[in-house]
Amino acid sequence: MPRLTFLNPTGPGSAAITVDAPAGDTILDVAEHHGARIGHACGGNLACSTCHIWVQEGMGSLPDPEDKEYDILDKAFDVRAESRLGCQCRLGAADVVVEITEESLRAWLDENPEERRRLADQAGGK
Ligand code: FES
């Protein structure tokens, strides 16, 4: 079973999360089950760029992107050679390390306003 590590799982500077994850699961699915905050405005249907991640290790074990994924990534912010969409990356046999982009972390908070409020309250000393 491959190990999947999320860098910045709950925000910049947060402690990494490493989990064993079944081959064939998408990185987005694993994130949802383990509390890593990857946005997913379209529900994993390849229609937004909110699940944008940077694959730091293990890119070769992931399926190659299809043309539509490149089209969607064109709409993302801070796209790099290691950019992928978390909903399109099914794990293979090898371990993978991904960094969640700020775009995706922001999208996750937009999708979870109660958590955004809780963080704002915390920051305000309430
Ligand atoms: S969740 Fe929308 S493209 Fe991945």
Image: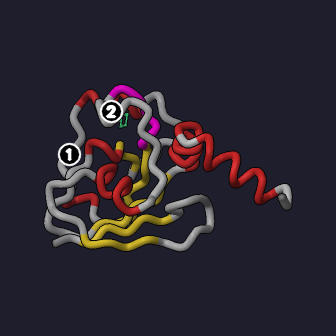
Classify mark 2: helix, strand or loop: helix
**Predominant secondary structure in magenta?**
loop
Q: Nearer the viewer, residue 85 or 118?
A: 118
Residue at 38%, 63% in the rendered image: 34
Q: Position of residue 101 (x, y in %)?
A: 52, 50
Question: On the image, numbered disc 2 is attached to which residue?
Answer: 70
Residue at 48%, 53% in the rendered image: 37
Q: CA distance from mark 2 to mark 1?
A: 10 Å
Residue at 48%, 42% in the rendered image: 79
Extent of the magenta region:
47-51
Dividing the picture into quadrants, the one containing residue 124 is: bottom right
- Asked whether the beta carbons under mark 2 and mark 1 sit within 8 Å of each other, the answer is no
At label 1, the amino acid type is Asp
Extreme residue in the right direction: 125
At label 2, the amino acid type is Tyr
Question: On the image, numbered disc 1 is attached to which residue?
Answer: 64
Dividing the picture into quadrants, the one containing residue 71 is: top left
Residue at 40%, 47% in the rendered image: 83
Q: Is residue 31 magenta?
A: no
Q: Position of residue 1 (x, y in %)?
A: 16, 72
Numbered tag placed on residue 85 in the rendering: none
> Is 35 positioned to the left or the right of 64 in the image?
right
Ligand 1, image quadrant it occupies: top left
Vertical position of residue 41 compared to residue 94: above or below: above
Specify the quadrant that holds the C terminus.
bottom right
Tag 1: Cα neighbours inside 10 Å, few (<14), some, or many (≥20)? few
